[in-house]
Amino acid sequence: MRTSLPRLVLEHRRTLAALLAGIAVLAGLSSVRGSTDGPVVISAARDLPSGRSLTAADVRSVRLTDTTVPRAALTSVSQAVGRRLAGGMRQGELLTDRRVLGRGPLEGRAAGSVLTTIRLGDADGLGAVRVGDEVDVVAVDPERQDAARVVARQLEVLATRETDGSDGALVDLAATEEGALDLAEAGLRSRLTVLVSTAGQAPR
C-alpha cells in the first residue's frame, strides 16, 4: 500500500526538522567565512571621550560583510589618526565621517606652528592674496614717523576673509609662537600689509 506524502512528512517530521536546522547552520557558517572577503572598516579600540585626538592605538581595523558597512565609514587607520572625535565612543563602535571632525589648518606643518590672524589696513590688498601663498608682513606707521619694517617673512596664508564696514580684511597665517606675538604687537601700533612671494623666488 502506497504511503501518502503528508503522512511521510508527519512520520519523519523530527528528522526533517533536524535536517533543516543543519542546513541553516551550514548557511550561517558559509556567511561567516564569506565575511573574510568583506571590506575593512575602522572601529574604536577602547572607550574614547569626546574631543579626543585619535592615535593609532585608539582604533583598529575590522572586516565586515557588505551588508553591515555603514555609509561613509572610515576604511583606513590613516583616515582616523590625528582627527578629533565629535562625541564619545564605546569600544567596537565604527567610525564614520560624522563621528570625527576635520583636521585642523595646521596639519602637516612644523611642530610648534600656531595659527595667527592679522588685519590688513587696506582691504583692497586682499585681492592679491591667495590661500597657500607665502607672504612677508610689513608694519607701516600710520603717523609716518617711522619707516616701514618687515615683521615676519614667508608665512603661509591659511585663509582670507573680508570684514564688515571699512575695517580692512583678515588673513590667517601659520607662524611660530614668537612670530605670532610679534605680529600681535605690531598690529596694535601699526597698519599691516603683506608682500606676496614664493620661497626662493622674487616677490611678485
Image: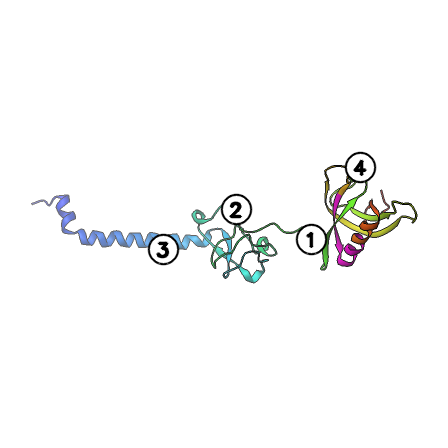
Quadrant where the C terminus sits is top right
| Mark 2 burial class by Cα count in 10 Å: few <14, some 14-19, many 20+ | few
Q: How is the image coloured?
A: rainbow
Residue 28 x/y as whole percent = 35, 53
Residue 197 x/y as whole percent = 82, 46
Q: Which residue is mark 4?
A: 124
| Mark 1 burial class by Cα count in 10 Å: few <14, some 14-19, many 20+ | some
Residue 180 colored in magenta in the image: yes
Real-space Cα separation, disc 1 to disc 4, in angstroms: 27 Å
| Mark 4 burial class by Cα count in 10 Å: few <14, some 14-19, many 20+ | few
Going from the N terminus, do you reach mark 3 or mark 4 first?
3
Residue 106 bears which disc, if any? 1
Circles 4 and 2: CB atoms closer than 8 Å: no
Residue 29 bears which disc, if any? 3
The residues colored magenta run: 170-183
Q: Which residue is mark 2?
A: 72
Going from the N terminus, do you reach mark 1 or mark 4 first?
1
| Apparent side of residue 3 relative to residue 63 in the rendered image (left or right) | left
User: What residue do we see at 47% from left, 58% from top?
Assistant: 92
Going from the N terminus, do you reach mark 2 or mark 1 first?
2
